[in-house]
Image: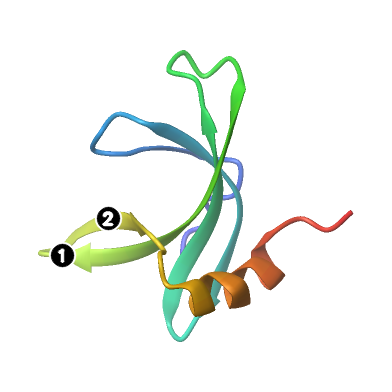
Amino acid sequence: MENRINKLLTLKNNKKYVVLNQAIYKEKNYFYVVGVTEDESDVLDEFKILEEFQKDGTTYVRTVKDRGLLDLLSKYLKPRA
């Protein structure tokens, strides 16, 4: 697993996110990300948990939508005050 914390991810739809935290759960890599503006000068109020997966030797991410998995991962990925 590559450490992607504080790295920029640009998705296929050209949306950009900075990785705030990451974790492995059941042998899958997950990222807690925040959206950034197109010019990368400011953060947006858009937070997501993304799951990394491989397809045909290429690495992709997809948004986690399962409520139970989101609740579990958010306990570990979201920053604590």
Which sits in the foreground, 37 or 6? 37
Q: Do the residues labelled 2 and 1 touch (CB within 8 Å)?
A: yes
Q: Residue 22 carries which label?
A: none
Residue 3 in sight: no
Asked if 44 appears above or below 20 in the picture, the reply is above
Query: Which residue of the protein is positioned furthest toward the right in this rendering?
Result: 81
Q: Quadrant of the C terminus?
A: bottom right
- Residue 36 at x, y percent in the picture: 52, 27
**In this view of the protein, which residue sits in the foreground, 18 or 64?**
64
Report the front residue among 51 and 68: 68
Residue identified by numbered label 1: 55
Q: Is residue 40 visible?
A: yes
* Vertical position of residue 6 compared to residue 74: above or below: above
- Please name the amino acid that badge 2 sits on: Tyr
Q: Where is residue 8 in the image (x, y as percent from the top left)?
A: 48, 36
Q: Which of marks 2 and 1 is nearer the N terminus?
A: 1
The percent position of residue 51, horizontal first and vertical second, equals 40, 64
As measured in the structure, the alpha-carbon distance from the residue carrying label 2 to the one carrying label 1 is 7 Å
Residue 65 rendering spot, x and y as whole percentages: 40, 65
Q: Mark 2 points at which residue?
A: 60
Under circle 2, the secondary element is strand
